[in-house]
Amino acid sequence: MPAKPKIDFSDPQQERSKKTLEDLLQAAYEIVEAADPAAFTSRNLASKAGYSLGTLSQRLGSVENVFFWAIQKNRDSKLNSYVEEMTQFNSQLTIHNFVEIFVDKAFANMNIVSTKVMRFYDQRYSLKYGLTADYFDYTDVLVDPYLVLCQKNKTNTFRLLSVEEARFIFKCGLTLVERPFANQDPIAGTKEHRQIAIDSLTRLMAK
């Protein structure tokens, strides 16, 4: 598998150029948050940021890459909210409580509109770069805070995991929770889907 390409942009040397780049990136992020892939266009980005199409080409190079960047940033923001909740998780709650809370939070994020964005990213990114070696590594940010949470928990229901086992389990969680939405599986978001995800992850993570 190829390595994941770095998505970056020309480094502005002047303060005015830096401001232009920041405006364009912020506009792309706001467009992605609105979650309509039909709006992921050069013209819409230029209009949103208040710049010409020529400025986009000069500052960003590939406009498609800026939307990849914005989707990744939006995804990372959601994962960071999970991390924050892990750091505040009640140490008197069990592993089953933990799994229920986080599956429900993930389901709340996986609505029909965001699913369209996920499919846009899957299709367009893989078409451009292929399935890179670290394509699903974005869940790794959850590993360290989860292992700390396990050590602090008082219920004796959390199984202590190695770093590598935790990495694999969070990727399993991605398959159980997120991918049915991304793949438009008929079960996605149903009570049955929720129960399968909760039961499966609890078995993987409980003592």
Image (cartoon, rainbow, N blue to C red):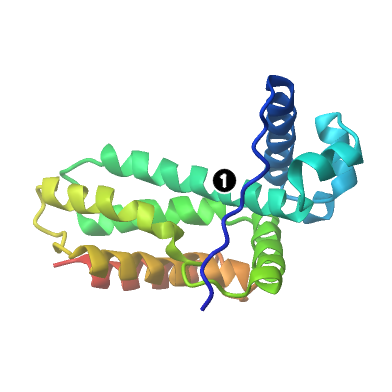
Left of 207 or right of it: where is 102? right
Left of 67 or right of it: where is 193? left
Residue 98 on image: x %, y %: 29, 53
Label 1 sits on what residue type?
A: Lys
Residue 102 on image: x %, y %: 38, 53
Give whichever of 109, 39 is nearer the camera: 39
Q: Is 113 drawn above or below residue 120 in the view shown?
A: above
Find residue 122 and report its image quarter: bottom right
**Disc 1: CA contacts within 10 A as few (<14), some (14-19) or many (>=20):** some
Give whichever of 106, 193 is nearer the camera: 106
Residue 57 on image: x %, y %: 83, 45
In percent of the image, x 44 and y 71: which residue is there?
176
**Number of disc labels:** 1
Q: Residue furthest top?
A: 15
Residue 138 on image: x %, y %: 45, 58
Q: Secondary structure at mark 1?
A: helix
Left of 156 or right of it: where is 89? right
In percent of the image, x 73 and y 29: which residue is there?
23
Find residue 156 and report its image quarter: bottom left
Q: Residue furthest bottom?
A: 1
Give whichever of 7, 71 is nearer the camera: 7
Quadrant in which the C terminus appears: bottom left
In percent of the image, x 24 and y 70: which residue is there?
165
Q: Residue furthest front?
A: 13
Q: Is 63 drawn above or below residue 46 in the view shown?
A: below
Give whichever of 197, 83 is nearer the camera: 83
Pointer 1 residue: 73
